[in-house]
Image (tube, rainbow, N blue to C red):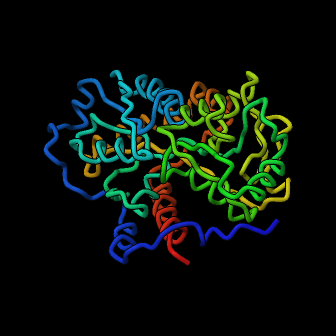
Amino acid sequence: MKGISLMKIMKPLSLVAIAALALTASGCANRGGETTSSEDFPAKTITMIVPYQAGGASDLSARTLAKEMEETLGQSIVVENRTGGAGSVGLTYLSARPADGYTIGYLPVETVMLGHQGYDLDPAAFDVLGQIVSVPATIAVRADSPYQSLQDLLDAAKANPGGVTVSNSGAGSIWQAATTALNEAAGVELKPVPFDGGAPAVTAAVGGQVDAVAAGISETSVAAADGRLRVLAILDASTSEALPGVKTAQDLGTDVVIGGWGAIGAPAGLPEDVKKKLVEAVKSAAQSEAFTAVIDKSGNLPVYTAPAEFLTFYNAEASRFATLFAEK
């Protein structure tokens, strides 16, 4: 199989958008939120926005982290799922909330992708509070699928271009990009089919609405463990203990590595004292045994990265996707 040329994947990007992506994810003014300080924050319940449906990888990471953050902050954190538009609905809502610390959210890799795909979403609209997880991609089929291997699936796609369907968590999502990347690497035409979140995408594959699903390990490994799915390959550089016996696409002859990540963020412009408290709570929660045990078991990788270091990566990812989605 030929190696993947990720430069070919998507669309052109304006110079204005590229310039915007070079900005840091902070520096906007507080937009009318309550006056808060390190002395009284948090004085009430905090809301955590998850831009996908309950039951998926993002939701699992966010809910597990929120529970641990409550121990540090001494306040309840209510998780609110706001779905649609490959995460754009929830992320846009989060960006428009008052920058007072009482609304935070899960920032997926799509945060730096969607602006290149027609969505009005700027990565600089958020203050990043730390990375918490890395999410390798997988490709899977229902347990009784005639496709016994990745090669079977690719051969079928080659024989019937556009006739083999692959569900994903939404148009513009990293999992749709994973299908496109697999197409590029293998020289085939799998047809991406968007759903409103990873859990519905997996359900569609299990129910036979589509031929396969591209999703994170935490979403496919559960369905594989209970016999509903067969995972054909991991689209990462390494195998996973959550999927024993499943090889990487590279090991199987298709040179593609792609996946997601997750971080916690808030509307840009947080008061520094409030931001400091939230950063400390995210760090403590992300490094807790309770959080890492859940994420390890899911197959995802618990990865805590502090805001300053993560912001460098965040901006580099924004530039990477600017190139990825640009026309060759």
Placement of 229 over or under 115, stated as above or below: above
User: How many numbered discs?
Assistant: 0
Q: Please state if 213 lies on the left or on the right of 245 as rendered.
A: left
Residue at position x 37%, y 75% from top? Answer: 14
Q: In the image, residue 46 lies at what x, y percent?
A: 30, 29
Residue 214, picture quadrant: top right
Q: Quadrant of the N terminus?
A: bottom right
Q: Please state if 289 lies on the left or on the right of 92 as rendered.
A: right
Q: Please state if 179 lies on the left or on the right of 153 as rendered.
A: left
Residue at position x 37%, y 62% from top? Answer: 24
Q: In the image, residue 243 lies at what x, y percent?
A: 77, 35
Residue at position x 72%, y 32% from top? Answer: 142
Q: In the image, residue 241 lies at what x, y percent?
A: 78, 35
Name the residue nearer the viewer: 109 or 76: 109
Q: In the image, residue 106 lies at what x, y percent?
A: 43, 40
Residue 66, picture quadrant: top left
Placement of 12 over or under 180, stated as above or below: below
Residue at position x 25%, y 51% from top? Answer: 269
Name the residue nearer the viewer: 171 or 299: 171
Placement of 78 over or under 281, stated as above or below: above
Q: Quadrant of the C terminus?
A: bottom right
Name the residue nearer the viewer: 221 or 242: 221
